[in-house]
Image: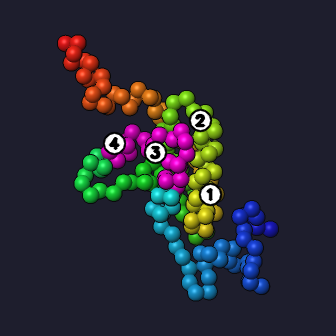
Amino acid sequence: MSEQSGSSTPSTSGGSGTSRQHSALDSAQGSTTIADGVVATIAGLAAKEIQGVHGLGGGAARTVGALRERIPGARPNYSQGVSVEVGDHQASVDLEVIIEYGVPLADVASAIRRNVINAVERMTGLHVTQVDISVVDIHLPEDDTEGDDSGSSGQAQRSS
């Protein structure tokens, strides 16, 4: 009668399996809680592993992330563009992604969803109830060359 029949683990100890569906997080010796930031980092890294994903986060998040990366000693923010809600045994994930131009968006979204669910469930023991994906931008190949100092700005100087 469990709503999570696809993710419940078989009972290895007799009798009291009804109060603890996820024995990896709750045991007789204590309980384990997982911070939202941990789940967000796992989800962000899992999303970035998918071919066709250029990056995560909307415009403001990317700007802040770019500034942060320029600070000496600053750590990369792997959870940029990721928001999560973590309960005792479940988690939901919202992602803002930038996709490479030319890739099938639906296929990339499905691959992201599968990879995020697998990574979060495998590493945390939490059941992922949903992964919502918002495609916030498309990365164009010429976007890489515009920021290059030896690229179009050099050509503009020659034509003056």
Q: Is residue 2 left or right of residue 117?
A: right
Q: What is the x, y in percent for residue 127?
A: 63, 63
Which of the marked residues, 4 or 2, is nearer the chain's N terminus? Answer: 4
Q: Where is mark 1, residue-wise?
A: 118
Which of the marked residues, 4 or 1, is nearer the chain's N terminus? Answer: 4
> Is residue 3 visible to us here?
no
Q: Is residue 142 left or right of residue 9?
A: left
Residue 63, disc: 4
User: How far is the residue under mark 4 from the one under mark 1?
Assistant: 30 Å
SS at circle 3: strand
Q: Which residues are magenta?
A: 43-66
Q: Amino acid at mark 2?
A: Leu
Residue 60, disc: none
The mark closer to the camera, 4 or 2, is 2
Residues at circles 3 and 4 in contact by the CB criterion of under 8 Å: no
Q: Where is mark 2, residue-wise?
A: 105
Q: Residues within 10 Å of mark 4 (few under 14, many from 20)?
A: few
User: How far is the residue under mark 3 from the one under mark 4?
Assistant: 12 Å
Q: Residues within 10 Å of mark 1 (few under 14, many from 20)?
A: some
| Viewport quadrant of the N terminus | bottom right
Q: Amino acid at mark 1?
A: Asn
Q: Residue at x 43, y 41 (%)?
A: 58
Q: Residue at x 62, y 82 (%)?
A: 27
User: How far is the residue under mark 2 from the one under mark 3?
Assistant: 14 Å
Which of the marked residues, 1 or 2, is nearer the chain's N terminus? Answer: 2
Q: Is residue 97 above or below residue 114?
A: above
Q: Residue at x 51, y 41 (%)?
A: 53
Q: What is the x, y in percent for residue 113?
A: 61, 49
> Is residue 61 visible to us here?
yes
Decide which of 51, 107 is in the foreground and name it: 51
